[in-house]
Image: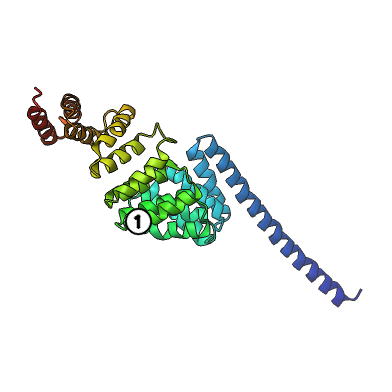
């Protein structure tokens, strides 16, 4: 072999060696990131969140564009109550993997936890566009719209969620609250009248139905639902006062006095004015 050919061959082998080294290094880094991420998941499942977070951060250092590791780190920051760093991780995940509905759902849910209602709308809208079967994100989107004052869009979101998950009590109750707030009581009565048998132990459902019935001037029908709601959650202030009003309207004075007194015991220390108003009703009904 001529000296020129030998030199060319050596140069080629050298170049291949360099490329091979780069390839091996790249694979090693990829494996390192994945190993750290898997360990983070194992620690997370064991409830060892600080150790899990350290592993997730190591995975990100090994591969900064590792979207799954950013999501895991974000969920761990959230578990640890460190919400601002969590939001940074979810922002990175959605930037790196914009077609992943889960990342948008996590980002939107965190905005809700931070009470950033308007900021939650866009990521949650993106989440349900990418994955219309995600009932949880439909519910969160409904909450975001309700908190920003857009009741119609909130109702639409809750109804979309119920198409996916027709028996979700959270979606049913949130739609009922939104309907009640919009004074669409008959719609609430229909909605909850169809659902209540399936959720007999759900005090919120009984309370929302009772509120709708009382507001529709159907106190006699509301009373058993107030009673059931209070059997399941005996110290709910609003339910106690409204229940007493219904009893008074239906001329059940003795029980009304008993419920007003129970209400007074619950609110006296925190709200003396409310307790005084209830005492006025007790006095008017002849109770002492």
- Identify the image quadrant of residue 156: bottom left
Measured from the top left, where is residue 7 in percent x and y?
Answer: 82, 73
- Identify the image quadrant of residue 285: top left
> Which residue does the image show at 7% across and 28% down from the upper left?
283
**Who is closer to the viewer here, 94 or 59?**
94
Label 1 belongs to which residue? 145
**Who is closer to the viewer here, 164 or 7?**
164
Classify mark 1: helix, strand or loop: helix
Where 177 sits versus 203, above or below?
A: below
> Which residue does the image show at 34% across and 29% down from the upper left?
232
Q: The N terminus is located in which quarter?
A: bottom right
Measured from the top left, where is residue 227 in percent x and y?
Answer: 29, 29
Q: How would you rate the neighbour count of disc 1 (Cα within 10 Å): few for under 14, some for 14-19, many for 20 or more?
A: many
Q: Is residue 169 left or right of residue 148?
A: right
**Who is closer to the viewer here, 248 or 260?**
248
Q: The C terminus is located in which quarter?
A: top left
Where 244 sits versus 142, above or below?
A: above
């Amino acid at each position: 072999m001529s000296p020129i050919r030998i030199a060319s061959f050596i140069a080629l082998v050298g170049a291949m060696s360099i490329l091979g080294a780069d390839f091996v290094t790249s694979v090693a880094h990829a494996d390192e990131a994945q190993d750290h991420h898997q360990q983070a998941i194992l620690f997370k499942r064991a409830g060892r969140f600080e150790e899990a977070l350290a592993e997730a951060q190591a995975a990100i250092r090994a591969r900064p564009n590792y979207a799954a590791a950013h999501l895991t780190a974000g969920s761990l920051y959230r578990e640890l109550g460190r919400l601002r760093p969590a939001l940074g991780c979810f922002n990175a995940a959605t930037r790196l993997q914009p077609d992943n509905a889960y990342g948008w759902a996590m980002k939107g849910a965190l905005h809700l936890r931070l009470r950033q209602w308007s900021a939650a709308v866009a990521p949650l809208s993106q989440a349900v566009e990418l994955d219309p079967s995600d009932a949880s994100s439909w519910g969160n989107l409904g909450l975001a719209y309700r908190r920003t004052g857009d009741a119609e869009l909130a109702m639409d979101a809750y109804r979309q969620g119920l198409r996916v998950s027709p028996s979700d009590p959270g979606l049913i109750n949130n739609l009922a609250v939104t309907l009640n707030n919009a004074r669409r009581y008959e719609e609430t009565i229909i909605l909850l009248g169809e659902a209540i048998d399936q959720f007999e132990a759900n005090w919120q459902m009984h309370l929302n139905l009772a509120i709708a019935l009382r507001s529709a001037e159907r106190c006699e029908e509301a009373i058993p639902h107030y009673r059931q709601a209070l059997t399941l959650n005996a110290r709910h202030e609003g339910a106690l006062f409204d229940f007493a009003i219904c009893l008074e309207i239906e001329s059940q004075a003795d029980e009304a006095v008993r419920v007003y007194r129970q209400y007074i015991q619950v609110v006296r220390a925190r709200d003396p004015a409310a307790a005084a108003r209830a005492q006025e009703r007790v006095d008017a009904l002849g109770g002492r």
